[in-house]
Amino acid sequence: METFFAAASPDYTPFWILAAGVVFVILSIVKLRLHPFLGLILGAVLVGLITPDLPELTKAGGFWSDNPGASHFTQSINWAMAGFGTLVGKIGFVIAMAAMIGMCMMESGAADKIVRRLMDALGESRAAWAMLISGFVLSIPVFFDTVFFLLIPLARALALRTGKNYTLYVCAAAGAGAITHTIVPPTPGPLMIAENLSQPAGNAIIAGLLASIIPVALVMWLANRFNDRFKIPLRETKGSSLDALGKIVEKKDDELPGFCLSILPVLLPVVLISMVSFLGLAAKLGVTISPEVKTWLEFVGNKNVAMFLAAVIAMYTLARQRGWTMEKLGEAMGAPLETAGVIILITGAGGAFGSMIGHSGIGDTIKAIGVSEGNTVGMLFMAWLLTAVIRAAQGSATVSMITGSGIMAPIIASMLEAGTLGCHPIYFCLAIGFGAFPLSWMNDSGFWVVQRMSGFTEKETLKTWTVMLTAIGVAGIVQVIVMASVFPMKPDKPAAKPEAAARVSSVPASDSAAPDELRLHRRR
């Protein structure tokens, strides 16, 4: 009898490997102060080293293969680099284009134009809504820090003019910007989640925008509460005197580009990328689309093509406003691409860590213990809590999303294969995204950006920014669990695949796997 139970008992080794990898990444970043890129890539190698049996890496598409008789250490390094290269190949170009779009919109005045038009349309009495909508829209293609740098002088100028509501303006802009930055691609975090969980970018954009409605309403409610309760005054900040703020509202509108041209780099990629998802919906509804039209729409709706077109428009706008030559424009792209390079390195390292976790066999263990069977709520909450713990421990929302999705990817893939996933994978994308909100405090660079630029004290920032982001995260996971329970959209169990066809990492349906994709084979 003891022999029978010993044979039937699942192997929990992958869980210990997972725990060791997560602890190493957190400690390396928090205690050893390593750059997240090094922490994640070394964590990937560590996971490979303590995984008893790694697959054989077969050369394909320019990647290297394991030499005959390669040591386990060499295999660990090779697989880490393969995971890094695969993920960078998928989303590196998109991140680079997003950085260029953000810089061009700032420097050309396009972002300022969007804010002004919203101010004109809503009026000064609804200026807080203008700040909120501006933060929400601009943070879709532009990094949060950049958006906040743009909006905080406007918030300060508004407060100087009206003599009130400074806390309201700051919290509305910051909270809304944080929402789209964290749950709506093409910013790196949510884009990485979608790639790891094999969800088309269009689906992730649509789901993120829909899931942000309640959190945005919560942000406005909390911003009003904070404004009434704390009465934070407008203070001098480093590099921003109160006298200089008056000049912001005096800038002539004709010095800025037109509104349609200004907002096009934001809307175009969202529409084009989402359009591919609607093609799939149209097919299910029986709507016939000619093959030629479908091919063309899928091409322009490819996330790389869509972001490139948006970047071209943003660069054209900047060059026209400044009267720059192509040479000058090319030189100006150096700074945003340098910023994007760091983010791409971190994201690629996260891909290496996530793929290595998959090779540990954790998916097989999950299937063996049946933890996913009928436990949708528990699995969603686990994905959220795991991400939230990593976020609170090391500070970076992006790193927490990369790590959380990398850990959950093999688990969800295993559940899909077994037919035990209780809801659509897109709900897990949202759960992980909302897990990156709670407990933004002193170890988060975003905390210091908000604190220093706004002139809030550390205590005031904890009472406003930290509380607001934590509330968004909690409300978000509650919303996701309710929606997944009411509208699970449970996917069908996929057809069985040969073991030899297992892939390095899943590829979204909208992005066909390249013929040179890596292939792996388990050693027998």
Image (cartoon, helix red, strand yellow):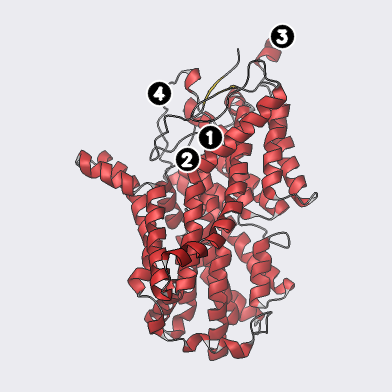
Question: SS for tag 2?
Answer: helix
Could you tell me how many numbered marks the image carries?
Answer: 4
Residue highlighted by disc 3: 3
Crowd tier of the residue under label 1, counting other residues whose Cα lies within 10 Å: few below 14, some 14–19, many 20 or above:
many
Q: Give coordinates of residue 313: x percent, y percent.
A: 37, 63
C-alpha distance separating marks 1 and 3:
31 Å
| Residue at the image position 66 percent from the left and 25 percent from the top | 75
Can residue 8 be spotted in the picture? yes
In the rendered structure, find residue 495 and report the number of the disc placed on it. 4
**Pick the front one: 467 or 457:** 457
Most distant residue in the right direction: 31
- Kind of residue at disc 4: Ala
Question: SS for tag 3?
Answer: helix
Crowd tier of the residue under label 4, counting other residues whose Cα lies within 10 Å: few below 14, some 14–19, many 20 or above:
few
Q: Give coordinates of residue 181: x percent, y percent.
A: 53, 59
Q: Earlier in the sequence, mark 4 or mark 1?
A: 1
**Pick the front one: 477 or 435:** 435
Q: Give coordinates of residue 521: x percent, y percent.
A: 55, 19
Q: Earlier in the sequence, mark 2 or mark 3?
A: 3
**Pick the front one: 65 or 200:** 65
Residue highlighted by disc 2: 425
Q: Earlier in the sequence, mark 1 or mark 2?
A: 1
Residue highlighted by disc 1: 412
Quadrant in which the C terminus is drawn: top right
C-alpha distance separating marks 4 and 2:
17 Å
In the rendered structure, find residue 459 and report the number of the disc placed on it. none
| Residue at the image position 40 percent from the left and 75 percent from the top | 321
- Kind of residue at disc 3: Thr
Q: Are marks 1 and 3 in contact (CB under 8 Å)?
A: no
- Kind of residue at disc 2: Pro
Q: Are marks 1 and 2 in contact (CB under 8 Å)?
A: yes
Question: SS for tag 4?
Answer: loop
